[in-house]
Amino acid sequence: MDAQSSQLDAPSAAPRDLVRVLLDARKVSDGGIGVYIQNLVRGFAEAGGVSLTLLVKPGERPAALAGCSLIVDSSPCYSLDEMLFLARRIPWQRFDLFHTPHYVLPLGVPIPSVVTVHDLIHVEQPERFFYPWVAKRLMCSAVRRASVVLAVSEATRQAVIGLAGAEPSKIRRIPNAIAPAFLRGSSVLDLPAVVAEAGSFFFSLFSNLKPHKGIEDLFEAYRQFKSQGLWRQRSATCPKLVIAGIGADAIARSPRLAALVGSIGDIMVLGKVGEGQLAALYRRAAAVVVASRLEGFCLPALEAQAVGTPVVCRPVPALCELVTERDVVAADMSAEGLRDALAEGLQGAAAHGRAPYPAHLALYSPARTAAQVVEAYRAAVATEAAR
């Protein structure tokens, strides 16, 4: 299909008090940003305040977007077409505001815009040598031209201010939301059969295997935890390590990682799982382990907390914003620090109850996050109107 936009289900005229928003949802199936988009759409349904249209790729119709007005465009994300030509194809007269949930803001958007920045991983932990050069310029351009910038954590907010030299008042911290499925809870454990028979286990979720996710450090920490018998005073048997997520599918394709898994033993790799199975894995785990060296936020940590499971993580600033007294933060970023945190997390799991903290989780409900975003939209529109 040629790069062009087409409108589906044209939005009806919105009441004057609703902000008519075009939200870029082309990354709705893309890891953490996709979950951010889905939870934001759910939140708008509860919070109100917007007349919402979504910009989507051809053939992209996730259930979470059902009932929304759509504009279809085949422009790839992070492409020259997105940057230079996308804005020419959009019927901007229908909207008050454009929201892009990643740090690329197309040139030529003629209405107020809001940009969400999740992290600076392409700058601080790049996979390729040219990423920082490109990402800095795209991010600084988006921050400069946007009416309001949203950062999903205070750590990300401060990093954006430092990178772009932005006025602090322009950058708002509005966190990700937890999917309602995790907040509702369930007495049904939809565990994969192989895990149901595994006994005690640590659980770790990987959306990808990029270097900052720390999977090799996790394997080394677990190897030491197991071989040194750090579980003996806390458990009758050594907990297994269960790995799941889209990123886990890549382990089998990496001879080095597959060999590590085989040599250590007691590591179970599930790959991608459904939302019900994911909730069950969180709930049954002794602890949920986040081995990342850098994150802009961490939904798996919140999702674990939502079902009452303690989190074991490294001292990453964005993660430290989320933890409670039940969770364990490693003393340092080393594999040895993570090993010791696994032992402490196993001990804590046995000592503490599993009831979630409602007041903590309420800070991350879809409706609350969406209401804050709507407030940012109104501020963006008002700011541009005052110029």
Image (spheres, rainbow, N blue to C red):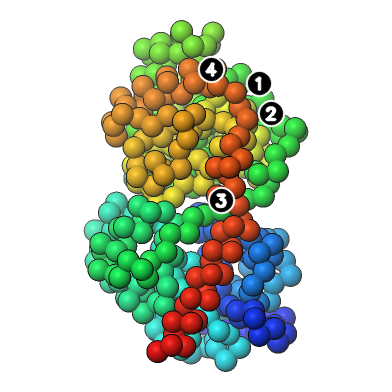
Mark earlier in primary sequence (2, 4): 2
Mark 3 or mark 1, whichever is nearer to me: 3
Residue in view at x 24 percent, y 58 percent: 129
Q: Residue at label 3?
A: 364
In the picture, the disc for residue 351 is: 4
In which quadrant of the rendered view does residue 167 lie? bottom left
CA distance separating discs 4 and 3:
26 Å
Residue in view at x 34 percent, y 37 percent: 315
Q: Are marks 2 and 1 in contact (CB under 8 Å)?
A: yes
Mark 4 or mark 1, whichever is nearer to me: 4
Mark earlier in primary sequence (3, 1): 1
For residue 132, say whether it is visible: no
Residue in view at x 39 percent, y 18 percent: 225
Q: Residue at label 2?
A: 193
Q: Residue at label 1?
A: 197
For residue 148, say whether it is visible: yes
